[in-house]
Image: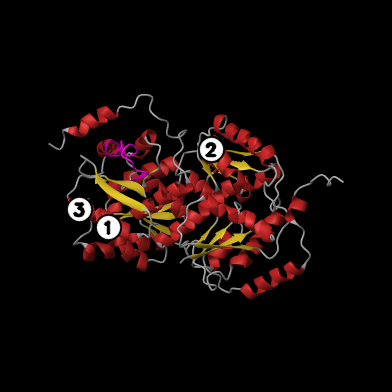
Amino acid sequence: MAKVLVIVPFPMSEENRRAREAQLEAVQLGPGLEFHFRPVRAAPANYTSEHDSVLADMSILDAAKHAQAEGYDAVCIDTMSDSGLAAVRSLLDIPVIAPGRASMLTALMLGERFSILIMWDRWRHLYRKTIAELDLGARCASIRSIGVTPDNQSLLAGKEDQVFPLLLAAAQRCIDEDGAEVILLGSTTMHQAHAYLAARLPVPVINPGPLTYKLAESALALGLRHSRKAFPKPLAPRTDLIDAMFANLGR
Amino acid sequence: MPKILVIVPFALDEAGIARRKAQLKAVRLDPQSEFHFRPVKAGPASFMSPHDWTLMDLAIFEAGAEAQAEGFDAVCIDTMSDSGMAALRSVLDIPVVSPGKASMLFALTLGSKFSVLAQWPPALVRYKKALAEYGLAQHCASVRSFDVPPDFDSLMDGKQEAVFPKMLEVCMRCVEQDGADVICLGSTTMHQAAAWLAERLPVPLVNPGPLTYKLVESLLALKLTHSRACYPKPQVPKLPMLHAMLEAAAAVPAMRPSVTAVSKPPPEK
C-alpha cells in the first residue's frame, strides 16, 4: 500500500478540504494507493503577489517537510503555482509532484500549443514564471481570464450556472482565436468545471490535480523521482526552524 | 479491461518480440491492463537515414491504423524516433503514445537538463532533428553515443559485460561534463541496460518503453487523448491503399535487421 500526501495550499475546514479531495473522483487510480489531503498550517490569503508566493513556498515546505519520515511514498502539491515544489524536492527523496510545470509538459504530449484558462488576471504571474523557466513562450497560445474573483475555500460551489458558461466561452476563444490545441485549467480550484468543459470542448482539457495523482502513481511505478543534480540537498537542513515558524501561528 | 497495442518497429520473429515484451517487467502496471505486442509487416533494416525513417513511419502507421476498430483502447509505439505517431494520431481517437518527445518532456518534470544516450554516431543526427522540432534543444545538455552498433533483434543479449560499462561511462560524462540532471535512454532497444545503469547513476534514468506503458494508463485514467486541432483527420482516408502497400512489402524477402544494421565480423569456423 503506497501512501501519497497531497498538500492543500490553504488552511481550511473539513468540508472544504473534502471539496479538494473530490478531485480524486475525476481519475481512475491504481489499486494499492492511498491519498491523504493535508492543508497547510498558515498561508497567504491568495496567490496574487510575490509577497504571497514567498509565504506559499514556506507554508507548503512546512506541511511536506517530514512526509518521508512520516511514511509517505510520494507528495503532490495541489497548486498550479508549483509553490514549494523545488524546496520540498531538495529535502525529500520520494517523488514530489506539482501540476504547473507538469500540466504544460503533458499538454505538449497531446498537441503543440496550449492555452491557460484562468479565473482572474491576478493569477497571470504564476504561469509566466513557469513558462519563462521552461522557455515555452512559443508554445503558449494564450492565457485567458474570465474576470471572476476565485474562492480558494468554497471553489466554484453555487456559482456553476454563472461561471461554467464563462469558462466555456473563454476556452472556445483560446481555440478559435488564439490557436490553442490543448486547454489547461489554470488552477486546481477550478476542478469542478473540468467535466463540464471536457464534454463541450473540441480539444483536450487538462485537470491539473488529477494529473498529479496519476503522475505520482507513475513515478512510483517507474521507480523515478526528481534529479538530485537539479534539486541538491541543503548542507544544513533547518526543518526545526521552519517548524518553529508555524508552530504558534494557529493559536 | 483496457487493451493496449504496442507496435514493434521491426518485423521481428517471436523471440525478438519476447525480448521487446520484457520491457513490461520494468514497471508496475495496472493488473487490468493488457499489452499486445505487434511487429510491423515490413520495414527498414537499419535506422540511420531519412530513407529508413520514411519506411518506418509508413510501417508503423499501417500496423496501428485499425487499432481502434480492432477494439484497442490505446497504442504505444516502441521507438524513440516517434515514427508513425503523427500519422496514427490523425486517424485514431484513442491515445497514441510514443517515447521520443514524451521521454524528453517527462525528463523535464524530474530535472532541468537532460542528456540523450545514443547507440552510435550515425544515430546522432536523428536526435538533433527531433530536439529542434520539439523546441527542446535548450533543455538538452548533450547527446552522446557509446559507439556500439545496434542490433534491433537480439538487442544487447550476450553483450552485457562489454557494453553496459561503456554506457555507464558515457552517461557519467553527460552528468559530470555536460551538466545533465536526467539521462534519457536513446532507444527502447537499450532497455536491458536500464536497471543496471539506474542503480549506478547519480541521476534519474528514463527507460522509454516502460514510460509509455505508464503514460497510456495515465491518459486512459484521465480520459485524455491527443488534440484534434493538432492532428486533423484526413479528408480522404486511404487506409486500404496503405495496407496493400505493406502487404506487398511483406512479400518481399526480408533482411534480418541486425545483419544489415551491424557490420559483424564473419562467424568463426
Which chain letter matches label 2? B
Q: Residue at x 35, y 61 (%)?
A: A171
User: Could you say where residue A103 lies in the image, as x and y percent from the top left?
Assistant: 40, 51
Instruction: Give the residue pinned by disc 1.
Output: A22
Marks 3 and 1, how far apart in space? 10 Å
Please tell me which residue lies in front, B256 or A183: B256
Query: Are labels 3 and 1 on one chain?
Result: yes
Q: Amino acid at mark 1?
A: Ala
Q: Residue at x 44, y 40 (%)?
A: A226
Q: Is residue A67 magenta?
A: yes
Asked if B5 appears above or below B125 in the picture, the reply is below
Identify the residue at the far right of this view. Answer: B269
Tell me where residue A52 sits by quadrant.
Answer: top left
Residue B115 appears in view: no
Give the side of residue B78 with respect to residue A203, left or right: right
Please tell me which residue lies in front, B72 or A120: B72
Magenta stretch, residue numbers: A60-77
User: Could you say where residue A2 lies in the image, as x and y percent from the top left?
Assistant: 37, 48
Please tell me which residue lies in front, B267 or A226: B267
In front of the other: label 2 or label 3? 2
Please tell me which residue lies in front, B63 or B121: B63
Q: Under tag 3, what secondary structure?
A: helix
In front of the other: label 2 or label 1? 2
User: Could you say where residue B233 lies in the image, as x and y percent from the top left?
Assistant: 53, 69
Which chain letter matches label 1? A
Instruction: Give the residue pinned by disc 3.
Output: A16
Tell me where residue A67 sits by quadrant.
Answer: top left
Instruction: Give the residue pinned by disc 2.
Output: B199
Q: Amino acid at mark 2?
A: Glu
